[in-house]
Amino acid sequence: MTACSRRRFLEAALGTTAMSVAWPAGSRDATPALAAQSLAEGLWLLTGAGANVVAANGPDGALLVDGGSARHSASLLRLALRTTGAKRVDTLFNTHWHPEQTGSNERVGKSGAKIVAHENTKLWLGRRIEVLWRTAPYGPLPPKARPNETIYTSAQRALGNEQIEYGYLAQAHTDGDIYVHFRNANVIAAGGVVSAGAWPILDWQTGGWIGGLVAGLDKLIDLADDKTRIVPADGLPLTRTELQAQRAMFFTLYDRLVKSLVKGLGPEEVVASAPAREFEAQWGDSKQFVTAAFESLWGHFAPDA
């Protein structure tokens, strides 16, 4: 690694590199009106709340996977109760800590609902979080708004006649990503590990990294079959075949970025090499994602001495 590249490496690791590009604040809140569509019997996809929300009805109330942004929370919860026919939200899953997934935590937490997440998500929500892709900090959430039921690996529960499995996707999009698999409906709510036609936020500052993103997709592909509907954080549900195509793309980028790191290139040099050029027609400008994906390698690959 050259002296110039090593200096860039150290500056970026300390959060001072000029190449650490933030996603515009609120860009993922520029959403259409709230709407509900059926995914399967007793299972709905709610859109327009800042991120996708999956809603189900159960004997004790509604179950939600993710809660949208705080500014959409009141409207989202009204829609969820009207759509499911429930009188209250009994359970809310947080697929990770991001504001677009945890914006209803405070409302449902105050009403005594179960908030389920990975333990790492609970830990993040108990502190002030400052990341490069947001211009403002997030949290800490008040105690009642934090997950009160956590997992480390996987767990199962019944919801009426539906069998639900939820499990850890390890360090992928963040270090607390989980999936929620509605087995009978053959639907997987995958959170931010899965994207639909736009580059995801690879939140390396809270434990995400591109190698883990590939591994997370491998796990979801193993869980799915050809008829499974996979719900991403944003956008329309995907098929297993589409997930396999994403996995191939992200592995290609992972391989190229590791080779660039081994060569001693710095972030500016990697972006200039356009490692994602052939994917931009479908996914858009890749600069922000490539920068974050390259930065995400630093905690997993030691630089040359």
Image (spheres, grey):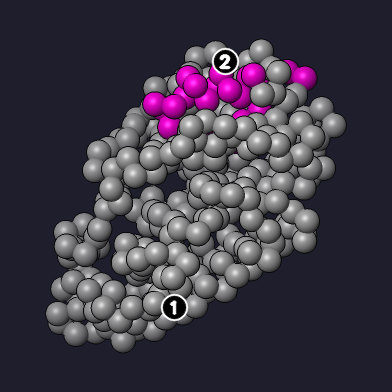
| Disc 2: CA contacts within 10 A as few (<14), some (14-19) or many (>=20) | some
Query: Which residue is nearer to you in this view: 103 or 111?
Result: 103
Q: Position of residue 49 (x, y in %)?
A: 48, 33
| Disc 1: CA contacts within 10 A as few (<14), some (14-19) or many (>=20) | few
Which stretch is magenta? 59-82
Q: Can the viewer see residue 68?
A: no
Q: Is residue 6 left or right of residue 91?
A: left
Based on the picture, tell me whether residue 128 belongs to the magenta stretch: no
Tell me what residue is drawn at x 72 percent, y 25 percent: 57
Q: Which residue is mark 2?
A: 112
Q: Which residue is mark 1?
A: 278
Q: Position of residue 74 (x, y in %)?
A: 48, 19
Q: Quadrant of the C terminus?
A: bottom left
Q: Is residue 291 above or below residue 64?
A: below
| Label 1 vs label 2, nearer the camera | 1
Q: Count the numbered circles shown.
A: 2
Tell me what residue is drawn at x 71 percent, y 18 percent: 85
